[in-house]
Amino acid sequence: MTDYAELVGRRFPAGTYTLPEYVCWLWSDAAQLPPVYDAHPGLAHVIATYGMGVSVQDILDLMGATTESGVTFGEFGVEYHGVLRAGATYECDAEVFEVERKRGRRAGVFDRLSFKVTIREKGSEAAVAVCTNVWIFPRRNGDG
């Protein structure tokens, strides 16, 4: 059974994402917040997801999973180092920092894939935010 430990340290191709002003407006409207000039901090997840340089399918392939295998979103965290701005373009670098094989009494064998996405405004070296993602990959019958 593959434990995927060799993925630790793997970097995803760098990507970019421009945060549309209308997305910021929709977020504020949906959350019933007053319009603001800066983007809501919760949009860091949107920037990370679209800017990380790989698709959800690419991550499933990396872990030998399919859309039918029951992959779930385990955890998400953000460290903020600056302010997100509507209309700004962000460069994102992503890297796997942990793959852990676990066994649960109910869940059986599963893998936890942890990766972080560092978000920088285009042309800047300073991180605006760092998003940490943990995805859970069930391994039916211990396979995978």
Image (cartoon, helix red, strand yellow):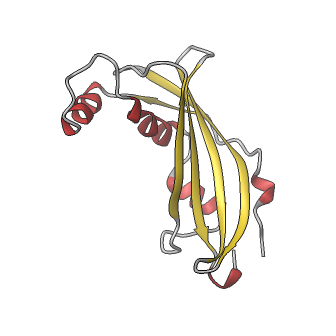
Q: Position of residue 72 (x, y in %)?
A: 50, 63
Rendered image quadrant of residue 63: bottom right
* 91 displayed left or right of 3: left
* 125 displayed left or right of 99: left
Q: Is residue 85 above or below residue 139?
A: above
Q: Quadrant of the C terminus?
A: bottom right
Question: What residue is drawn where x is 75% and y is 62%?
Answer: 4
Residue 1 or 114: which is nearer the viewer? 114
Rendered image quadrant of residue 2: bottom right
Q: Position of residue 112 (x, y in %)?
A: 65, 60
Q: Is residue 35 above or below residue 2?
A: above
Q: Residue furthest bottom?
A: 141
Question: What residue is drawn where x is 23% and y is 37%?
Answer: 31
Q: Position of residue 126 (x, y in %)?
A: 61, 17
Q: Position of residue 26 (x, y in %)?
A: 22, 34
Res 63 visible: no
